[in-house]
Amino acid sequence: MTFTMWGWLHIVFILSPIIFFVILHFIAKGKTYKQKQTIGIIVAIIAVILLLLRNIEIFITNGYKLDAELIPLQICHFANFVLLFAFLKDNKTLFGLAYCLNLPAAIMSIIFANSLENYLTMFTFKAGAYLFGHMIIVGVSIFAVAEGFVVLNKKIIRNTLITILIIFISSLLISNILNIVLGLDANYFYALKPEEGTPIEWFYNWGSNIEIGKFIFNPLYLLLTGLLGVVVVLCFCGLYKVIDKYWLSKQKNV
């Protein structure tokens, strides 16, 4: 079975996080905060195990050689660990990061799933990790918001933006270092170039790469992508206020 953009599998893929959230919400109904936290931890662990199995498959099929994909610094792979530690520690900054960064990024990866068309079959751990991994990230992130784990205030929003900036700059440095030293094709958090077929590809095309030795970066692309990231965070903060007003406040009064 192969994947076709806007085919039946893609439509099911787009709907899957909503269905998964509804299932989680039904399971958590009437449960205490701690019990809901346990549900989140279990789901996050499942996502990490799925990612691990995917990496094992890639490692074996690549002839037991190191590959950039094996290091979980891609936005959505990194999200699995953000969610796990957020639920384990009930860390509001990590929940803010999961909601403001990982959630919109995973949604984009579901809508613009062009890369899945390159898979010869969907019956591999790699394909399954893409499908179920993104479903879990989006579904459990919505679950975290709906059940009151995500709390956004000025301090948390500031910490979230600072964390995103640090991660983005670190990704640029790490990607370049791994590419130069180990000859990998690393592009963590799309710091070097965008995923093909996504809107931020325009930013990359508007700018041009600068090379300092073997170190490569696209200043305009980085600037515009960073500004877009801030806009996305602020938009999701606004969405959170609406959710807090019409959903969370209602839940507290039940």
Image (cartoon, rainbow, N blue to C red):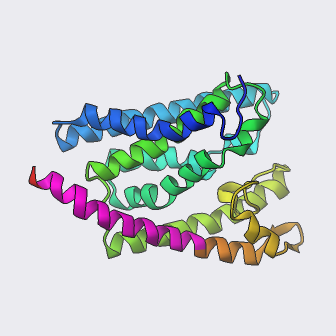
- Whether residue 84 appears in this view of the structure is no
Residue 4: image quadrant is top right
Identify which residue is drawn at 77% across, 60% down. Answer: 177
**Foreground pick, 128 / 163:** 128
Dominant secondary-structure state across the stretch colored magenta:
helix
In the picture provided, is 171 more to the left or to the right than 25? right
**Foreground pick, 176 / 243:** 243
Q: Is residue 234 above or below residue 180?
A: below
> Which residue lies most toward the left here?
253
Whole-percent x and y of residue 213? 90, 71
Residue 37: image quadrant is top left
Q: How many marks?
A: 0
Identify which residue is drawn at 41% across, 57% down. Answer: 94
Q: Is residue 120 above or below residue 83?
A: above
Residue 40: image quadrant is top left
Whole-percent x and y of residue 222? 69, 73
Q: Give the magenta-colored segment's residue range.
A: 228-252
Identify which residue is drawn at 81% across, 55% down. Answer: 179
- Whether residue 3 appears in this view of the structure is yes
Q: Is residue 12 above or below residue 171?
A: above
In the rendered structure, does residue 53 fall within the stretch colored magenta?
A: no
In the rendered structure, does residue 229 fall within the stretch colored magenta?
A: yes
In the picture provided, is 153 more to the left or to the right than 128? left
Q: Quadrant of the N terminus?
A: top right
In the picture provided, is 11 more to the left or to the right than 197? left
Identify which residue is drawn at 34% across, 55% down. Answer: 91
